Amino acid sequence: MNDRVTVEISGGVADVRMVRTDKMNALDDAMFSALIETGEALKTTPGIRAVVLSGEGRAFCAGLDMGSFAAMASGERRANTADGQSLLTPQRTPGGSNRAQQAVMVWREQPVPVIAAIHGVAFGGGFQLALAPDMRFVTPDTRMAVMEIKWGLVPDMGGLVLMRHLARGDVIRDLTYSGRIFDGEEAYRLGFATRLCADPRAEALAYAAEIAAKSPTAIRGAKRLIELAETPATQHEILLAESAEQGAVIGTPNQKESVMANMEKRAPVFAD
């Protein structure tokens, strides 16, 4: 899928770039396929310790391709069946995603941390895609919007699953009902941006390299715990999970290496 997404792996960091620059990385059928195929492949690629997701050219992602809106207006596409499944994509993943949703959710499903590097615009589906990674590094002048209402639509690519953990309900309602555009600085204030950066991709790659230099066993365990804490799990379940994850890492080669490297004041060497 090199005409839509490229991947370069170095030092345990997967540098994933959308490269449909002539369309500001807009989401067409080929982009959906490329995002899903790339994300699924990275889940099981040996040696991956962190992922950076970004867009080449002028923007992170401008949202759904304009041709798709024209098709909707012509009546070629219908919204949903009675059971909530897209007519075009009746198959759903075990997590409940249809095809368009999985192009977003596959980045939340990565076993390692994912950082989105966002510039230019992240509109509609592009904004929802930006929400899936663990963190978002954003330029102050990036423009974002939950833009579906402009086209008479609702967010349907996992946006509501992801927004609810980042912002208050009234904020989500405001952005969804109005479709208004907001910049990176407001995104930071509202909780949608993790860090404001002049060069998000450079900072995200540097941060990912820091993660890659830490115990991959502990990083993956920590990610599982954080994700559990974001579910309706009870305090009892989370406390048990903490103990289980800690018990699973204590005494492992990577945990021993962490201790020895600190004691010997040297860089650790971890095994994947």
Image (tube, rainbow, N blue to C red):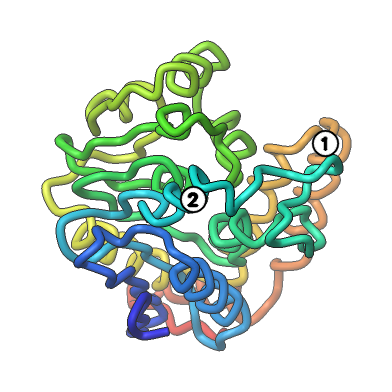
The answer to whether residue 263 shows anywhere in this view is no
Q: Which residue is at a point 57% across and 82% down the rendered structure image?
A: 41
In the displayed structure, would residue 24 be above or below residue 158? below
The amino acid on which the numbered mark 2 sits, given as a three-letter code, is: Asp
Specify which label sits upstream in the sequence, 2 or 1: 2
- Which quadrant would the C terminus be assigned to in this image? bottom right
Whole-percent x and y of residue 243? 80, 51
Q: Residue at x 41, y 43 (%)?
A: 127
Q: Is residue 163 left or right of residue 183?
A: right
Q: Position of residue 269 (x, y in %)?
A: 44, 84
Give how far apart the Cα atoms at labels 2 and 1 are: 19 Å
Say whether residue 129 is left or right of residue 23: right
The residue under label 1 is 233
Residue occupying the point 60% across, 42% down: 156
Local packing at callout 1 (Cα closer than 10 Å; few below 14, some 14-19, many 20+) is few
Residue ID for mark 2:
134
SS class of the residue under badge 2? Answer: loop
> Is any part of residue 76 visible from this angle?
yes
